[in-house]
Image (spheres, grey):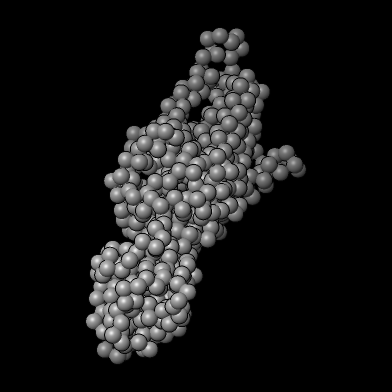
Amino acid sequence: MSDSCCTPDAQHHHHHDEPSLFGQLWPAVLSLVLLIAGLAMDYGVPQFWFNGWLRFVWYFAAYLPVGIPVLAAAVKHLRKGNFFNEFSLMGMATIGAFAIWEYPEGVAVMLFYSIGELFQDLAVSRARRNISDLLDQRPDEVTLSENGTLKTVPAAAAVPGNIILLKPGEKLALDGELYSDRAFFDTAALTGESVPSAKNRGETVLAGMINGNTVAEVRVTTAYQDSKLSRILQLVQEASARKAPTEQFIRKFAAIYTPVVFFLALGICLLPYFFVADYDFRVWLYRALVFLVISCPCALVISIPLGYFGGIGAASRNGILVKGGNYLDALAQLKVVVADKTGTLTEGMFQVQDVVVFPEFDRTEILKQLGALEAHSSHPVAQAICDFTGNRVAEWTLQDVQEFPGEGMKASMNGQILLAGNKKLLQRFGVPADALPEPVVTTVFMALNSLPVGYITIADRIRADSVQAVRELRDMGIPVVMLSGDHEAVVQQVAGELGIQKAYGGLLPEDKVEKLKTIRAQYGTAAFVGDGVNDAPVIALSDVGIAMGGLGSDAAIETAGVVIQEDRPSRIPAAIRIGRKTRRIVWQNIILAFGVKATVLILGAGGMASLWEAVFADVGVALLAILNAVRIQRVRY
């Protein structure tokens, strides 16, 4: 059973070379038409000439279109020494039916089995397409610029070193670095961030980004198939190969179950000879065949991987990349979510919160001077202040600007000394700081000629939907614990605003690993949500690593089992809901399959069920299970 075609990962065709729908359907349609015509001539309007070898040829012709692929698969498995699989079960049952002249039943068993397989193929390829559409939004062609001449080539043909010309609004097909001086890119497709991001010459740009309103040139750095998008796509293609424990169990189960069923069927056919007075080989062979068809584990082997596949597809439609059924299972059993602060629950972007200028100074003037001073620094805090004051560099001529790393800035201006920084800087220049408040968040103090003038507080903005995410998780009974390398005071303040009960600050990456071990010991199954390179070890250690940002760091995306395409923490509860629902559906399918099969098996062994009921027990259950599994994909979470 190990490589049965009932499992989505053994599909004979990948999404790019799928046969057309007609190509998949015609054998089943042809077979169905011949079967119905045959039944009509047998029972509807009986035809006197329709008997003997002619009747056999007619039904045999109906059998071939659907029978050949299955028998071929059975032979292929036999060559590998794998006798017990559903292909050989179906083959034996149908050939047996022909041997005892039950032609229509033989055709029906094979036909419905094929239809079940077909439905499953369609469901899987639909899930695959969903995922590919979600991710692979790259253009097929690119415009190369060579010595001033432009030519259009397939994107896959572009090689590293080529220069691509991007028109306004055009989407980039390959990863590269910006060759023009400056350009704006819309990264929403990759990160969900609607704010266009500015890129300067030499900065990295990624496939899937959309060029803003100027023509831009990009130098290709990675081949088409190695771009970040291709890698994510490939991770999804491989996702179906990572089996959930339930799936693995069913595979092992089927490997033992199939031979047992086979020998039981043999027993049903031959043993009564010793115990029944009027033993009729045909009657008992028929019962054994019924038993074989019913017990084919197809519904189980199909519906379980399909359930997980449906879950992966549903997640992808909701902007969540789940790398395998095992992660869906773990999501369903989560007991605690551990989250990193900066860049995960907060945006990692600094923003001025509060400005205090002492009354004896002119607020507007002071802010202008501060803006002019901070414009000389590239520190994120300085950038935030410049954004706030609006760069008015030209109005002030600053002399001897100095930056003191970790402390702040100093400059002289028309003979006055201007300082902006933390208390250490003020102490260095003898500014009395006793009257100034103790900072809770990042605070920039200002001084003019050794006198404190006021201060500005700056904080990392909390993501718009972090609060909602924490609340939803709490309603689901899952506590959130926050870990951060930031100051304890800042961490506690953010935790308060988010409604998180437990938060730990001042942690180095290795401290996070230790903390996570303690939390797991206390709560059980834990997910870790992070976005940075330093989060990779913690992500790897957790039961489910969740990487934030369709483009968080490469390391985080590689190690995480779940990647949230957009930087939206509220997708985490959605991922857990999808995990729980998948698990529910998988178990419904297992119970349904076992229930119906057990009933019909007992009836079959007692001679009260014909091959028609057997077909329902096998194919009907498989179809119901498939429809049930497809339900997962229909919902928005």
- Relative vertical location of residue 584 with respect to residue 383 in this rendering, above or below: above
Query: In the image, is 378 to the left or to the right of 635?
Result: left
Which residue reaches farthest right?
45
Q: How many marks?
A: 0
> Is 62 in front, or is 372?
372
Query: In the image, is 199 to the left or to the right of 196?
Result: left
* Image location of residue 561, percent across then percent down: 40, 48
Q: Is residue 369 visible?
A: yes
- Residue drawn at point x = 68 percent, y = 42 percent: 39
- Residue drawn at point x = 36 percent, y = 53 percent: 487
> Is 289 in front, or is 122?
122
> Is 627 in front, or is 323?
323
- Residue drawn at point x = 44 percent, y = 78 percent: 361
Query: In the image, is 326 to the left or to the right of 61?
Result: left
* Image location of residue 504, percent across then percent down: 39, 46
* Image location of residue 187, percent across then percent down: 44, 70
- Relative vertical location of residue 305 with respect to residue 265 in this rendering, above or below: below
Quadrant in which residue 216 is drawn: bottom left
Q: Is residue 187 visible?
A: no
> Is 310 in front, or is 66?
310
- Residue drawn at point x = 53 percent, y = 19 percent: 268
- Relative vertical location of residue 611 with respect to residue 418 in this rendering, above or below: above
* Image location of residue 5, percent across then percent down: 45, 43
Name the image quarter holding the N terminus. Answer: top left
